[in-house]
Amino acid sequence: MIIAPFGSNWLIRAGYMISPFNDIVTPRLVLRLMNTEVISACLNRKLTEAAVLLGAKIPVELLENLSTFNYNRQQLEADQNYMPWSARAIILANENIMVGIVRFHSTPDPEYLRMYTRDAVELGYRIFFEYRRMGYAKETVKAVLEWAGVNFNITSFVASVSPSNIPSLNLINSLGFIKVGEVMDETDGLEHVFMLNSNFITK
């Protein structure tokens, strides 16, 4: 049996200690944390180096939008507790290739979400173009919501979606998110804010 280090948040499942830093595994995907070395390599546009560090192939499309990684680095510099909530590569297991990114925007209960509810987290995700409309986003979102619930007892989730992003709107509606407001994002413009209160996802 693996021994949990003092002070870490570990879950005993089936006789084993499972860390919230571990890969999240679904039927088709592996959701793997991108550590600071991987993030730095991506920001420096060194995809070959980043792929070796990640342990999976990385498409060039990742370089089209590096804002997630800049945000990720800033959050980690401000709060080391952010690490398990930070960016994860969405890896298609049978091809060992990164097909997207998922992350939470902060640790639980940030001040900016308290107007909607307490002890919530906001999630964001991106699936690379070639891999869209294959159900990977829904599989990913369901997995990270369950991960947050199992490891940290989180039951309130927020997602902000552009009103023009019909696939994402359909996804969060299918999972039971309900619109609770609107915000003007400095980068993305108008976004609709949705919230889900649930102990787990069953559909």
Image (spheres, rainbow, N blue to C red):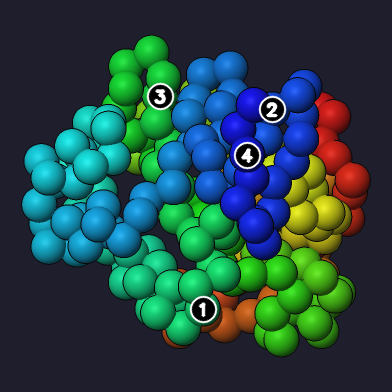
Identify the residue under disc 1.
79
Q: Mark 1 and mark 3 in contact (Cβ < 8 Å)?
A: no
Q: Residues within 10 Å of mark 4 (few under 14, many from 20)?
A: few
Q: Say which of marks 3 and 1 sits in front.
A: 1
Mark 3–mark 4 Cα distance, whole angstroms, equals 30 Å
Residue at x-position 64% and y-position 45%: 4
Looking at the image, tell me whether mark 2 or mark 3 is earlier in sequence order.
2
Identity, as a three-letter code, of the amino acid under mark 3: Leu
| Count of residue discs | 4
Identity, as a three-letter code, of the amino acid under mark 4: Ile
Residue at x-position 69% and y-position 54%: 9
Disc 4 secondary structure class: loop
Quick check: 121 above or below 149?
below
| Quarter of the image that includes the N terminus | top right
Q: Say which of marks 2 and 1 sits in front.
A: 2
Mark 2–mark 1 Cα distance, whole angstroms, equals 28 Å
